[in-house]
Amino acid sequence: MKTVKIKNYARFAAIAACAATAVLAFADLSWAQNYDSLAKEATTNGWRQGIGMTLCPIKLGILLVFYLAWVATTGWCNNDAERLGDPDQEQSNGLNLIVFVAAFFVALLVPIFWIGLPIVVLAWLVPIFIYVKKRNKGMLDADKVMTPSHLSFWFRTKVLKQQVKPKPKSYEGGSSVQLEATGLNMDESTKISRTVQSRNLNGSVGYNLFRELLYHALHSRALEVIIEFGAEETKFQYQIDGVYHPILDATKKPWLREEADEVAKAAKILIGGKPDDRAGRQNGLFKVLYDKNKKGKPKTCDVELHTAGVPTGEVFKAVFQFKTAPFKNVAEICDDPERQEKLRAVINSENGLVVLASAPHQGLKTLTTVMFNTADRFTRDFSAVEDVQHPYEFIENVTTTKYDSSKGETPMTVLPDVYFREPKVVLVRDMVNLEAWKLACDEVKNDRLIISTFRGADSVDAIIGLLKFGVDPKELADALTSVIAQKLVRKLCDTCKEDIKPDPRVLQQLGLDPKTDKIYRKRVHEPVEPGERDYYEPCEDCRDIGYKGRVAIFDVLEITDDMRQIIAADVDLDKKNKALRQAAFKSGQRGYLVDGARLIKNGVTSYEELIRVLSGKR
């Protein structure tokens, strides 16, 4: 709905007000003639003044002030909703008009002025506050209106006439997110040049649209954004809590084909790519600055951008690389004291080889940080080895030695020197070559604890993966002491989850008490019969996903003598896989199911979510 329609609304309201005033005059005469006591009260406190039965101009003037205020604020709401692409703009405008005009008539027809005036004031303010509350939800603090900081800024600039900052440049308008070029081994002049070129490309159209998309993604709790540039339309997907969701209103307004092209060019310039190459693969980093704190300093996050040509057009994948892990220690990632104690015992082992494992997108980087934050780093000498191209969060009391994979370096470039310094515990975050694994198995013999990471769906899968990678079975059997595998399950939204009576077969499968009377699931939107009203309201807390946040489940495998014999045996890997799982079950280790069943029992997650994660679906 365009602004001109708001002006038409104002004209309509003015005509309605004149008609209401005429009605008031007639009604005023009628009351005066037929109801003496009411007429006397109306003459004192109402619209009329004196015996001449004329309308009081002062009181009508007061009403006119509120009418003009309604016109101004409703016009602002319309313009703001149009700028943000609010799909409910037309309904909001209509509601504002109907409510105010109805209240205006009621106020004029009520003979007592001090009763009618509050009706008009409420009809003016309530729709405004409803719109503002809806508008501000999910926005950055800097973009919210009618907050204490916003009202303070308005008062200082509009009332006190204090000096304001210059008008923002084209690339500074809209959302408060800003983008800057970045990258390792890149000089400052190159970063500035790329940033300026991206901002100034064709009046900042592509740059601003890209900012708006990332703004929306950040406040949807997305970790990844996928943009599919098609011939006819542009599609978006957000990876939220490990699951991809199609986002239909990611930028509020759909991108035109020309706008999508500008976005692609601006993003490629930002990472130092080739703007006109729509077929080749391109990769790079840029930085997002967002959500300023009280001191005006913004948070920052690197974004890894991958582009690739596909038969239907081009696909962009933007991955947020937050500087801090979402969890700090095992108490935050696991709510079971017994499981916490087991994890602490493993990470504080005196010696041996400990492998941390997870499937892709299951929080292996966070698991490593959590385990090291949990370890006793004050009574033992800790060292870590990492690639400068893939930096990790800083951990106190850990000496970090870095290598640069962009120069052809590997962990073996620095590991001999690290081991020569004889630290008690060594963490090699990404053991990418076989020589490093062989050296790690040898160093265990020096009464050292070696910790590294490997990809695997569970603990046994990680061991089989190491053997496929080429690690000597006998050396691995001698060195390996524990494997900690992790998966992340989504937590049910506390606002909208619903309880159900569990199927006895589900309780039996999970090992739960058969007398359990309820478990929880994601709220289901039941279909309604044609013609019936649908009372379902989307949940604003989880954006109607049904889940909000994730929690870890663990498969902690402590290597027994039977398992060592199986690992070292010269048999087929498939048979070795089966034998290891049987040995783990025999030793009382139940893998992920124990943690998953506990979370279902406590209403933290759902049975459907646990099955999805255990089956490896995304």
Image (tube, grey):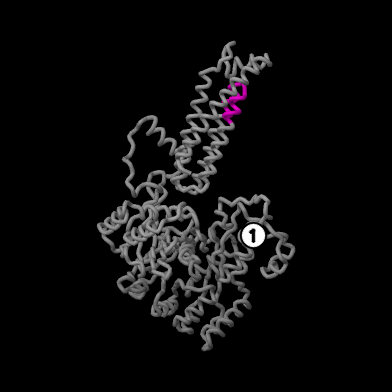
The amino acid marked with disc number 1 is: Arg
Between 17 and 248, which is closer to the camera in this rendering?
17
Q: Secondary structure at mark 1?
A: strand
Q: Is residue 85 above or below residue 367?
A: above
Give percent across and percent down for residue 5.
Answer: 48, 39
User: Residue placed farthest to the right in the image?
Assistant: 515
Question: Is residue 103 among the parts visible in the rendering?
Answer: yes
Res. 458 image quadrant:
bottom right
User: Residue placed farthest to the top in the image?
Assistant: 51
Res. 198 image quadrant:
bottom left
Give percent across and percent down for residue 264.
Answer: 36, 61
Question: Is residue 401 among the parts visible in the rendering?
Answer: no
Kindly identify the residue that appears in the image at 32 percent across and 64 percent down.
276
Q: Is residue 373 magenta?
A: no
Q: Which residue does the numbered mark 1 point to in the structure image?
A: 521
Between 515 and 313, which is closer to the camera in this rendering?
313
Q: Is residue 337 above or below residue 70?
A: below
- Residue 144 lies left or right of residue 603; in this view the side is left
Q: Is residue 441 above or below residue 233?
A: below
- Report the predominant secondary structure element of the magenta stretch: helix
Give percent across and percent down for residue 144.
Answer: 46, 43
The mark tally for this picture is 1
Q: Is residue 116 magenta?
A: yes
User: Residue placed farthest to the bottom in the image?
Assistant: 570
- Residue 6 lies left or right of residue 281; in this view the side is right
The part of the chain drawn in magenta is: 103-119
Give percent across and percent down for residue 504.
Answer: 73, 67
Q: Label 1: how many residues lie within 10 Å, few (<14), some (14-19) or many (20+)?
A: many
